[in-house]
Image (tube, rainbow, N blue to C red):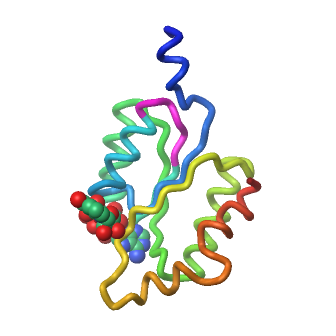
Amino acid sequence: MSSREKRWSLEGLTALVTGGTKGIGYAIVEELAGLGATIHTCARNEVDLNDCLSQWGKKGFKVTGSVCDVVSKTQREELINKVSSLFDGKLNILTRWHRCSSSNEHCVSLDQDPPWHCSVYKQCGN
Ligand SMILES: NC(=O)c1ccc[n+]([C@@H]2O[C@H](COP(=O)([O-])OP(=O)(O)OC[C@H]3O[C@@H](n4cnc5c(N)ncnc54)[C@H](OP(=O)(O)O)[C@@H]3O)[C@@H](O)[C@H]2O)c1
């Protein structure tokens, strides 16, 4: 590996990318995985998720996934527990790419006190 490649490598780092099966989230998974990160992603549609996981597996990317609707507190907690267990309590990167609904219902549930991303970091040991 050249020094330039080493500088940009994410080898050994972990990431949670919500909404990774489409759009920007999908592109972020591809980019981070291409740089060597180990990723967990989620989406609601299991067929889409399995399709993406299969494509990423063929590319040699280290990506796992959960079916999860992040609007649901119970499902968010399950996701956090899964990520904490998979990554042994070490989460380096968190990106949220699920769409907030125009009714604001999703945004409100995600922007509670403490904010969702804080509880992810707290529970995943960062
Ligand atoms: N695309 C753009 O040009 C653009 C520009 C600026 C900002 N944004 C913002 O970026 C975000 C993503 O937009 P996008 O157009 O790139 O993607 P998108 O096509 O809306 O896909 C969103 C991703 O999030 C997942 N998702 C949606 N709701 C979810 C939920 N409740 N729980 C878990 N996963 C959920 C979707 O899978 P499932 O449907 O299977 O759950 C999918 O993987 C949005 O917030 C959007 O406003 C996008």
Q: From which residue to which does the magenta span run? A: 34-39
Q: Is residue 54 visible?
A: yes
Residue in the picture at 55% in, 48% down: 15
Which percent across, then down, holds residue 27?
A: 32, 46
Residue in the picture at 43% in, 83% down: 106
Which percent across, then down, holds residue 95?
A: 49, 56
Q: Quadrant of residue 100?
A: bottom left
Which percent across, then down, holds residue 72?
A: 51, 82
Q: Quadrant of residue 45?
A: bottom left
Left or right of residue 99: residue 68: right
Left or right of residue 76: residue 67: left
Relative height, residue 24 to residue 31 (above, below): below
Residue in the picture at 38% in, 47% down: 28
Query: Which residue is nearer to you in this view: 25 or 78?
Result: 25
Relative height, residue 126 to residue 81 (above, below): above
Which percent across, then down, holds residue 8?
A: 50, 25
